[in-house]
Image (spheres, rainbow, N blue to C red):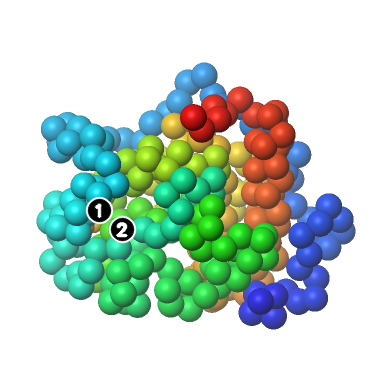
Amino acid sequence: MLEEMGLTPIWRLREDSTVVEPPPAAADAATYHPPSTIHHPPQPATGDRRGEIMRLEWKGLKARVAGCTDCPLHANRNKAVFGVGDENADWLFVGEGPGADEDAQGEPFVGQAGKLLDSMLAAIKLKRGANVYIANVVKCRPPGNRNPESAEALACEPYLHRQIDLIRPKLIVALGKVAAANLLASDASVASMRGKVHDYRGTPLIVTYHPAYLLRTLQDKAKAWADLCFAVRTMEGLHGGEAAVAEKA
Ligand code: SF4
């Protein structure tokens, strides 16, 4: 697993920060408090559609996505990729959108990037489907694996919003620029957003690199590892009761 990450033998989940230094803001991990003013991402103008989606439960939401034709991305999809995992997960990982493999299989992160994500999860003792949910900003594959356009991401945003409301994760990990930009309504770089605990509607969120990017940019795998360690410490801080995040009922 660590060999796959290109970091063996130095990847170790431990307190010793001499291996890979965490980002400078890592000390904030246990001190997250939801902001009194939450800055919501921009909302689609179609209020009725949004309201309808926000009232759906899992079954209806999955069916709505499977048959969705609400943006141009539906035209070339094979399968809409709803998301996968534990619907009561503490951990939510959010990527960009389906690629060719995901479009064919209807599951997120099943290609090479998916293998790397699974290795990343294993490195912090997590496993797909076990207290982990994986979703994307857009549910249908953008042609040629281009980034989703803002109108497409905006059209699909209520689905992810509703998924997050239903899952009620304790921590969201945004994988890459597109996920971070859409969840945080920010145009900042991943480099500038990592190492901090952000907020998505009252849920702490951290940013790291997308596995597909890491496959192309091996030198940033160490940074991704530091981000995962930061995420673990942030989650531990939440479990320690330091953060004012409401417990699940
Ligand atoms: S990307 Fe989202 S909004 Fe667009 S057609 Fe697919 S499910 Fe619908």
Q: Does the residue tagged 2 have its C-beta within 8 Å of any atom of ligand 1?
A: no
Instruction: Compare residues 65 and 59 and report the one nearer the observer.
Output: 59
As drawn, 103 above or below 83: below
Query: Residue 111 appears in which quarter of the rendering?
Result: bottom left
* Amino acid, disc 2: Phe
Q: Which residue is mark 1?
A: 62
As drawn, 177 above or below 117: above
Side (left or right) of 82 relative to 200: left
- Across and down, in percent, residue 179 comes to 43, 52
Instruction: Compare residues 166 and 228 and report the one nearer the observer.
Output: 166
Image quarter of the N terminus: bottom right
* Amino acid, disc 1: Lys
Q: Which residue is mark 2?
A: 82
Which quadrant of the frame does ligand 1 lie within? bottom left
The residue positioned 75% from the left and 39% from the top of the image is 27
Between disc 1 and disc 2, the foreground one is 1
